[in-house]
Image (cartoon, rainbow, N blue to C red):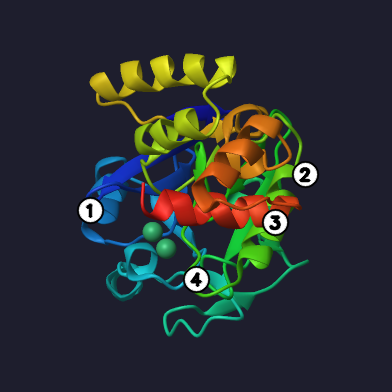
Amino acid sequence: MTEINKLKIYPLPAFRDNYIWIIHTTVHAVIVDPGDAAPVIDYLESHHLQPIAILITHHHSDHTGGNLQLLERYNLPVYGPLQEKIPTVTHPVREGDRIQLTPLALTFDVLEIPGHTRGHIAYFTATQLRNMLFCGDTLFACGCGRIFEGTPQQMYDSLQKLASLPDDTLVYCTHEYTLGNISFARVAEPGNDELRKLEQQAKKMRQQHLPTLPTDMATEKACNPFLRCQHLEIIHAAEQFTGEKLIDPVEVFTALRKWKNVF
Ligand code: ZN
Ligand code: FE
């Protein structure tokens, strides 16, 4: 859990490895990607929280499956991608839209980041202390989402767009995939010392059953192979996998993503 000003950002575990992020004060709460309603309701009730909005990043059921039951219980706006037809979304949003969440003193900017799904969006906010990004299944700690609906070029561009956010941005991903991602990253870039340190940290946290998230953008730029397609060691590893010379970063990215799928 992170605490920023008077805000708590709590990772509520769901299913096998999902996190439903609850952003809250002592009174109000915003729920990000509630795949399941039951743990959310438990958390809200035990902390006496009033939910004021749901933010949805993309249409997959492990991110939206709790909406209906939450809407039956609470009267809430549900923000979600305009490009995806999600029946429970009441407020479709797109690139450039701003969402004011006055009770939490937060304003979120909507970023379109297609690739994992065609309409995938992220929510970015700059608080007085830290920048925060809720990016669903696009950027993971040391990895990225699978390309289900978009093209590798789209996913590459989306990741680059996120990587251009400030280095101190805290990154709230929706799955605990970190250790598996690091195992792959270590093979793709064995000479990366930062990555070695990160692996030790992440292992320690998981041994204590703690979430490895949020990560931050500086760490991702230093360790995440999918953001490091210009680095020679990674280019060579990707070329070994494909058996071909790879000319541009998008080709390297495409090879890495294919490789990770079978890793
Ligand atoms: Zn997904
Ligand atoms: Fe997911």
Tell me which amino acid carries mark 1.
Phe
Q: Residues within 10 Å of mark 2 (few under 14, many from 20)?
A: few
Q: In this view, does 147 lie above or below 49?
A: below
In percent of width and height, residue 246 lies at: 69, 51
Residue labelled with disc 3: 250
Q: How crowded is mark 4: few (under 14 residues within 10 Å), some or many (20 or more)?
A: some
Tag 4–tag 2 contact (CB < 8 Å): no
Tag 3–tag 2 contact (CB < 8 Å): no
Tell me which amino acid carries mark 2.
Ser
Q: Indicate the secondary structure of the residue bearing disc 2.
A: loop
Q: Indicate the secondary structure of the residue bearing disc 4.
A: strand
Marks 4 and 3, how far apart at CA: 34 Å
Q: Indicate the secondary structure of the residue bearing disc 1.
A: loop
Q: Is 158 in front, or is 43?
A: 158
Marks 4 and 2, how far apart at CA: 27 Å
Mark in the foreground, 1 or 2: 2
117 sits left or right of 184 in the view? right
Residue labelled with disc 1: 15
Residue labelled with disc 2: 164
In percent of width and height, residue 130 lies at: 68, 31
Q: Is 155 in front, or is 132?
A: 155
